[in-house]
Image (cartoon, rainbow, N blue to C red):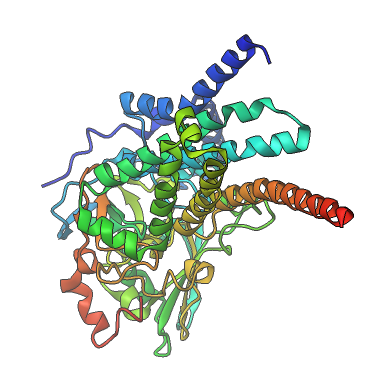
Amino acid sequence: MTTRGRVALKVVVWAVALTPLAGLLYGFATDNLTVNPIEYVTRELGEATIRLLLATLALTPLRLLFGWGWPVTLRRLLGLFAFFYAVLHFSVWIVLDHFFDWHTMGDDILKRPWITVGVAALVLLTPLAATSTTGMIKRLGGQTWRRLHRLVYVAAVLGCLHYIWLAKKVLVQPWVYAGLLAVLLGIRGFDASRRFSKRWAVIGSRG
Amino acid sequence: MRLRYSDVTPEKLYLSRRELMAGAIALAAVGCDAGTEAGAAAPAPAGAPLKATPNPAYRVQDTPTKFEAASTYNNFYEFGVNKEDPARLGHTLKPRPWHVQVDGLCAKPKTFDIEEVLKVAPLEERIYGLRCVEAWSMVIPWIGYPLAALLKLVDPRPGAKYVEFTTLKDPEQLPGQKPGFFGGGTLDWPYTEGLRLDEAMHPLTLLTVGMYGQVLPNQNGAPVRVVIPWKYGFKSAKSIVRIRLTDTEPKTAWNKAAPQEYGFYSNVNPGVDHPRWSQATERRIGEFRRRNTLMFNGYADQVASLYTGMDLKKNY
């Protein structure tokens, strides 16, 4: 891809990724965040997080399925946006929803599984965001860095659980996200098992 | 003191031009009807003024929620699962003609025309708290009369122990009842709810036909619903077509969907958490900070005696 193409792609990704935030700011400015704004903002930020996380996890499957290399160049950007929205989502919960009522929030984290897994997902994403720079990749070494960043799979599963467990059972949306995640992880899993059996075949033929 | 609703935007301003035109056509049709049936009362459209006498004995002190909020932020899954769906799609419901069948274990079962329902007892305005199981709340001036007045007309038999409410089932009028994207629906339609007979006869239990000085908007359960202010909102069945007296505890819609989460009683109780979230606090719509939820939504003085000796943790 040309440099200009890469720049254009990044501009598009920035614009798309910032749309949910822009929508909320516009809603705030025009007093249009529903009559229960805190709940609405929390939900929108959570949705943005899970969508961006799924987008991040869709890049490698695109390469595996279609042989496209260019999507992977967007991985860091999309991953950091997912983290950005997760932090906003969590901050709204702390500041607007509970207004620093640490006792209640602590209780919730310990007693409510859906909050426990949500907070756990954010905790897992934090070191990934912190080690997202090129310098950190070099410092950790490629292999260690890759291993560490496999935590994103766990975080995504926890994120989907968070949504499934908080929503009323009759709602479809959380299951759609979980299904998408299953497909995306399934493609990687299939590829990994194929590579694994190939390697075995090679070792076997040597013997 | 009489409440004033001058800060409330008339509902007509919300109507799009298309809806206005549909309304004009409907009005024209009504006009024809009135011509042929001389003397028949014109149906009261949602939003029309409705006279009622304020009852100061049933009036919470908190400021009522804005009409705009109470009529646009609704859980009424018959129109869809989102809060804004009922206001957006409510126009598909036709609150006239309407009949309410009252039957079961009673000496004089009867099917009431909605116009008869309106005249069973004098209409009162009562300002009640509304606490949703989702931990938000409102304060709403309802118009209606005690459900007991209607139930007495059909003369419940001694064996009657419970009352079952059934909401209209008609996917044409209630599009949320259409089969969902994956074949399944959201709830098992029609929506049913229930009360013990003594709860149903309690003076707080209001058969409701209006709010904010107006005929009940479709999205709030037109043309007739119940309001049981000491229970979570979903107990207050909307758009009722049948009220049945029975000797067995009625199956209720949310209990069928998630039995561990929504019990038959569903009394507002800050001490009994929903399995997934706390019920200790609530967000009053229009306020920033959460406030503490009160036992029986603040109606403990009036209703606690109904549950003497009962384990309210078990009977959630």
Side (left or right) of A35 relative to B37: left
Q: Residue at x 42, y 43 (%)?
A: A127
Q: Compare residues B23 and B258 and report the one nearer the observer.
A: B258
Quarter of the image holding residue B299? Answer: bottom left
Relative to A101, residue A40 above or below: above
Q: Can residue B41 be seen in this view?
A: no
- Give x and y (percent) for residue A154: 53, 52
Side (left or right) of B148 relative to B173: left
Side (left or right) of A180 relative to B231: right
Relative to B165, residue B55 above or below: above
Q: Which residue is drawn at 27% across and 74% down?
A: B202
Looking at the image, the residue that sits furthest to the left is B1
- Give x and y (percent) for residue A163: 48, 52
- Give x and y (percent) for residue B191: 52, 63
- Give x and y (percent) for residue B53: 21, 53
Q: Can residue A188 be seen in this view?
A: yes
Q: Compare residues B9 and A168 and report the one nearer the observer.
A: A168
Relative to B213, residue A158 above or below: below
Q: Residue at x 36, y 67 (%)?
A: B274
